[in-house]
Amino acid sequence: MKYLLLAVLQIAFLLTASSAALGQQQLISDPEIYEKEHFQKRCNAVKFGPDFITRLDINNDGIIDAVVNEGEIVCDGMRGPDCTDDGCPYNFYLQVKEGGYFMIATAKMYGYDFIKRFGNMVFVMQMHPRYCERTDEAICEITVRVRGTKFLTISKK
């Protein structure tokens, strides 16, 4: 009986902890405004390129989402202030039907193609070779599908 009570308490704690974690992320009204305000506070002079934000349905739910490319930012004269040899940060936001967005992922990459494969839209991300467990210099291509709120890797090459 003592062990059963302990198991029930542990399960209750885990459910409470996961519910709290889901509830912690607040929705933002628009990722473009949110990201621009962040960099306007961070930089003395900031410019945003034409490909700073792309609006498209990334998880095939019929609702337009957003992808922010930080490589399209010029902060105090420096293009892509957080870009490295691994690429530039891209932030992926999902829009919910009730209104608002939340970030589901950030990835450092060189770029991506958003294409249809077998009836589903997928990202083909161009990334540093180490993401494909390689030491050569050829770009790693990782194909992912967004299902719900998760990125599912389809292939790496």
Image (spheres, rainbow, N blue to C red):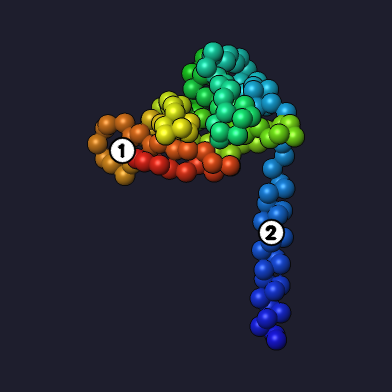
Which quadrant of the rendered structure holds the N terminus?
bottom right
Residue 17: give its label: 2
Q: Which of 23 and 47 lies nearest the eye of the viewer?
A: 23
Q: Can you name the residue that lies furthest to the front here?
A: 119
Q: Which mark is residue 157?
A: 1
- Residue shown at the point (38%, 33%) measured from the top left: 127
Amino acid type at mark 1: Lys
Quarter of the rendering containing residue 49: top right
Give SS at disc 2.
helix
Q: Assess whether mark 1 and mark 2 are in contact (beta carbons under 8 angstroms).
A: no
How crowded pointer 2 is (Cα within 10 Å; few <14, some 14-19, many 20+) is rated as few
Q: Residue furthest bottom?
A: 1
Q: Where is residue 50 drawn, in percent x and y?
A: 54, 13
First reached walking from the N terminus: tag 2 or tag 1:
2
Q: Quadrant of residue 32?
A: top right
- Residue 87 image offset from top left, x and y in percent: 42, 29
Quarter of the image containing the C terminus? Answer: top left
72 or 46: which is nearer to us? Answer: 72
Nearer to the camera, 32 or 120: 120
**Three-letter amino acid code at disc 2?**
Ala
The residue positioned 67% from the left and 56% from the top of the image is 18
The residue located at (69%, 61%) in the rendering is 15
Q: Residues within 10 Å of mark 1 (few under 14, many from 20)?
A: some
Q: Residue at x 72, y 39 (%)?
A: 26
| Residue 41, image x, y percentages | 67, 24
